[in-house]
Image (cartoon, coloured by chain):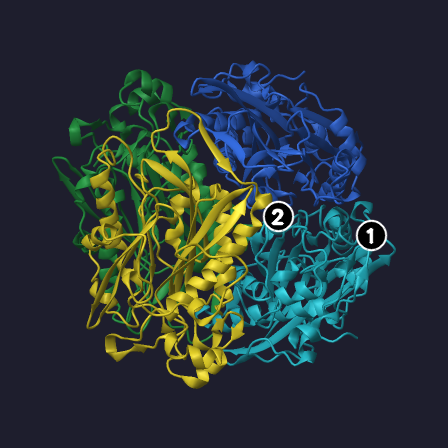
Chain colours: A cyan, B blue, C green, D yellow
Amino acid sequence: MNKRIRDYGINIGNLSMGKLNSITDVQGLKVGHVTLNEGEIKTGVTVIIPCRNNVFQDKLLCGLDVINGFGKSAGLIQIDELGTLETPIVLTNTFSVGDASKGLIQYMLSNNPDIGISTGTVNPVVCECNDGYLNDIRGFHVTSDHILDAISKASNDFQEGSVGAGTGMSAYKLKGGIGTASRLLAICGEDYVVGGLVLTNMGKKHELIIDGKKVGKELLKIDPSENELPDKGSIIMIIATDIPLSSRQLKRVSKRCIAGLCRTGSNISNGSGEIAISFSTANRVPHYPKDILRMKFISDEFIDPVFEATADVIEEAVLNSMLTAETVTGINGNIRYSLAKYIDELLD
Amino acid sequence: MNKRIRDYGINIGNLSMGKLNSITDVQGLKVGHVTLNEGEIKTGVTVIIPCRNNVFQDKLLCGLDVINGFGKSAGLIQIDELGTLETPIVLTNTFSVGDASKGLIQYMLSNNPDIGISTGTVNPVVCECNDGYLNDIRGFHVTSDHILDAISKASNDFQEGSVGAGTGMSAYKLKGGIGTASRLLAICGEDYVVGGLVLTNMGKKHELIIDGKKVGKELLKIDPSENELPDKGSIIMIIATDIPLSSRQLKRVSKRCIAGLCRTGSNISNGSGEIAISFSTANRVPHYPKDILRMKFISDEFIDPVFEATADVIEEAVLNSMLTAETVTGINGNIRYSLAKYIDELLD
Amino acid sequence: MNKRIRDYGINIGNLSMGKLNSITDVQGLKVGHVTLNEGEIKTGVTVIIPCRNNVFQDKLLCGLDVINGFGKSAGLIQIDELGTLETPIVLTNTFSVGDASKGLIQYMLSNNPDIGISTGTVNPVVCECNDGYLNDIRGFHVTSDHILDAISKASNDFQEGSVGAGTGMSAYKLKGGIGTASRLLAICGEDYVVGGLVLTNMGKKHELIIDGKKVGKELLKIDPSENELPDKGSIIMIIATDIPLSSRQLKRVSKRCIAGLCRTGSNISNGSGEIAISFSTANRVPHYPKDILRMKFISDEFIDPVFEATADVIEEAVLNSMLTAETVTGINGNIRYSLAKYIDELLD
Amino acid sequence: MNKRIRDYGINIGNLSMGKLNSITDVQGLKVGHVTLNEGEIKTGVTVIIPCRNNVFQDKLLCGLDVINGFGKSAGLIQIDELGTLETPIVLTNTFSVGDASKGLIQYMLSNNPDIGISTGTVNPVVCECNDGYLNDIRGFHVTSDHILDAISKASNDFQEGSVGAGTGMSAYKLKGGIGTASRLLAICGEDYVVGGLVLTNMGKKHELIIDGKKVGKELLKIDPSENELPDKGSIIMIIATDIPLSSRQLKRVSKRCIAGLCRTGSNISNGSGEIAISFSTANRVPHYPKDILRMKFISDEFIDPVFEATADVIEEAVLNSMLTAETVTGINGNIRYSLAKYIDELLD
């Protein structure tokens, strides 16, 4: 197992981390990968199953922020309107959003015989980054079956780095991929967890910052290769929590993801579609309501620690995604090196 | 050919219509259908090809309004961010957005060998309504090949009613589908056209208004069937024009579609995902810019007639979609009657 | 008392009205006017006091829609962020927003000694229309004291028409002003009321529609005067209800105001800043929270009647604002005639 | 003159700065202050005059981002709708937005006899932070005359720190205020400048980051005072440039301000209303258009250096605002120390 940023003695922020320092510290949440890694095929699928029970029948509150809309994610409009998440969240490459949506709908249909018959449709949430630098993205190698496969493999113990949707991704022109982290906090006497998961695929070498240290210029000196091309990447940032937050508050949480991201160096470049989605497992919204809904929320007066935890979790998850990713050679012989190769020299 | 609303002596608004009274009055624009109509399969695809030249290499300015985000359309986030349209617009049923996106990407790849290799990806725009009342929507009967087929069939002379994406749609609990209309106007001494196309699938009988006449209550008396179920529909409204408008102005135009829609009776119900997209053929945005871009726009001071034309075009297109649609019996023996069956009695 | 639209035998929509057919059918809500009507001064202030108790200490949930942002209303950004209303809502003319904001802050300070000392500031909500056609708007005739005065005069029985903020307003190039209406409905076995209040100052003669009847062309024939100038107006639409709705749902309600407005003819012209604000008295948000907040909401599955009531209430309130307003001659001898002068001929 | 961050040998980012390293490096732009600093009165006004000619008659393109809407700024809604700036931008304290709006309108009326008579109204842009910790904010000490005064004092050489609107502001629980910086860059062979000005009033001590160095914890050790109270601040960030950018692109630029801010430590706390406004002097939008408008823009493909310059300018301007501000004792004996007092120890 590759080392994470903490293994280098670096603690991001002031809050303590959860047991696994992972988004799966949120009870009931599971993550599954399908990795496609053969020759020019460097891509895959990562699925976040947000809670134990049927999320369509009992939806979760959810809010999002489109930081840079240069992206092709599916399902965002309805989250914004209704404030609910009713499917797992799938991450994959840009051209596979269609197949992934179909696979996710098929999964939902197989578990909910009412959809499309006695009730309306379902809103599949599929987010994407462009892995075309390493992957044969024009080959449409992800199929709808891969979604079912990733769901079946989901557990609370999952790999980071060049796996699943992260297989072919790049970050700061090094290897990117899947990263995660978590923080613990107490509000009104209750203990809660804020977990984050990122799919990193953005940035240029000269921008990189590690825990405040602006190492980009040095990195460029050590390895000046491949930094000329514009950033055509993206980053997807998912926050999960058991804190009782409304969809409005979860949108506010999503807006704080950018604080963590920018502290790793990103200037949110033109071509980098940056999306943050946050959901809470604390309230459930029934698909078939029988009466007035009763919910609980924290006051916005108590939300600052949640914002701080969000920024810290994203900053750490981005660094974890890079350090745990191994060097990958993909299509056309394109190479992305692992940050692990340079980290000792950069932190020196 | 079924009669349109004008054939009943009804002229919506004060402006004169274009030659075809169709969105294809905008030069270079073409519309193509694939209709799937066999037994329980009542669905299809409608494609709007927005201009003659390669729209990816020379994009069009575009703006949109998400009136009700209870919908699953693809491609909207990027239009909002970049203000450009770079593919044809595909309309289909809700569950087929994935396959349609894939088909549209494949079409774009075959015409643009640079996408995904020497340049970034492409933003497929696919809008949808839920035709599950008449169609076996769980069957995923639209394939990616149908997109290519619809594109190849596109012309400036196309059918309205129960065709293409409109095959299984409902409006005001009668038969809905595809409708179109256009208006002419002059700004700063230049002649222009505003064209609209709608895919109607919203509303309940008691709401229906025809050119101001609130006929809903009478309609419900004549035919009280099937009005109890909630509206799980949607409407997609497309405005095309040759007026030089910025993406900001095109968003403003999109916001006026609702005026026309509401004048046919809709109260924009909870389950009805209502999306308006407007584009202009007057400026082109090069994918590979070489220098500063030079563009022309009308002043917002001159935009009121465009808003009026937009409202009128949508009001007329909605009515045309219903009058030209024939009565259809679909899955489970569900029936939607044509407005043509009741119109004489209602206008009496 | 001038006649309202119901007095002409016209019932908008299918729902029954509240006892007063007024926004004050919502328990605890009061409205107060200060009318400035001397010579060239045709302006004033209207205040909506949303509930009985101190609204700063126990805020109301609130949501809004900026339909056309060509306007200068104050306080909207914070409502959108926090989803709460913490002051009365003040309506006045465009140039008096500053003085009105100051007066409203002063009122809040006098009732809340903590503001600006032991707690933060306060968000005054002031909406406006441009009454410059009839009023000496450059004269800044509204003072901060007028706000206190209007608050002190507030009651549940208030006048419509050319009063308060409506004194100098125009609608469809006739006289506009203040109008109101309400509807009753039941959700999950509970009875509720939806009340609306509008400040009308938009539109042109040829657009006017009365309960579906497109009377604009005839109105223009009867009185062709003053229709050439562009619409530089606006409309402010306020919805109050006791239905338990979240701020997200109240934003959705606000979005349906446009349905009622457009059915009176408006095409939402360029210069017409159109703002809708909705609030609910059912939940309170404490300024000094002590613990987790507990709230109740209806499901969005039950919200369609609320949307219908909203559209109907706005349509009726717009017509009431015009019918109850008397003909006014203002600055430069400019005249706006009352719709009451033409209504019999138009409905004939 | 107090030292700026560069005087400590710290260069933010990789781009070179403008001649003055100030927002006034943008040709024609001027800044003026009125400082009210007597006893418990610690407040004032800062005005940004965006260009030489009458900005109402020939408006500038403008775009904004409401990062956290917990704020009371005026004029934002219309900028978002029309994409233009038609007045100077005024900064002041929260309760003085009303008086400042009035003063700004009066200034506009005196220079434009058509406003409110032969044309519509005017949209005053006034942004604010809450200086109540040091200032007697309940005293309404800013008058409309102060706006005229600040405008008359505007020049391209202006002070930073505890001046103008910054007189009573706090940043990271130290003294905040006005800061500025600029960057030079070339696009398509043309030289341009990006200038930034901030009014800082946000953050807590433990968050502070100086050029990557996370000094907050050390700062808290050196001076643990006054860090318990929640952040009730705000920050206003203004970007000016001569790059030809559309209002859509200027909104994108505004969204990148947060990158610079967060790199100084902010987590965008609940009570901190954060607003970014960007305008360009390259195109003018005539109030009285005679014909089609012709404009020029850079392609979004060339915008990344603008984003990078924006982030760097804001990061530097925030630090400048703190270093140039002197220690201030205000109402109730409350003290905010200057960062200059601690900087040597922190950078050690």
The reply to whether callout 1 and callout 2 are in contact (CB within 8 Å) is: no
Tell which subunit mark 1 falls on. A
The answer to whether residue B97 shows anywhere in this view is yes
Q: Position of residue B104 (x, y in %)?
A: 74, 37
Q: Position of residue D209 (x, y in %)?
A: 49, 72
Q: CA distance from mark 1 to mark 2?
A: 24 Å
Determine which quarter of the picture holds residue C114. Answer: bottom left
- For label 2, the residue is A70
Instruction: Choose between B48 and D49: the one closer to the eye.
Output: D49
In the displayed structure, C309 sits above or below D138; it is above
Amino acid type, residue under disc 1 in the picture: Ile
Tell which subunit mark 2 falls on. A
Is disc 1 surrounded by few (<14), some (14 to 19) or many (20+) residues within 10 Å?
some
Judge from the rendering whether residue C216 lies leftward or rightward of residue B252; answer left or right.
left
- For label 1, the residue is A331
Judge from the rendering whether residue A47 lies leftward or rightward of residue C44; answer left or right.
right
Determine which quarter of the picture holds residue D28. Answer: top left
Instruction: Choose between C129 and C214: the one closer to the eye.
Output: C129
Residue at position x 72%, y 46% in the image: A117
**Dot 1 lies on which element?**
helix
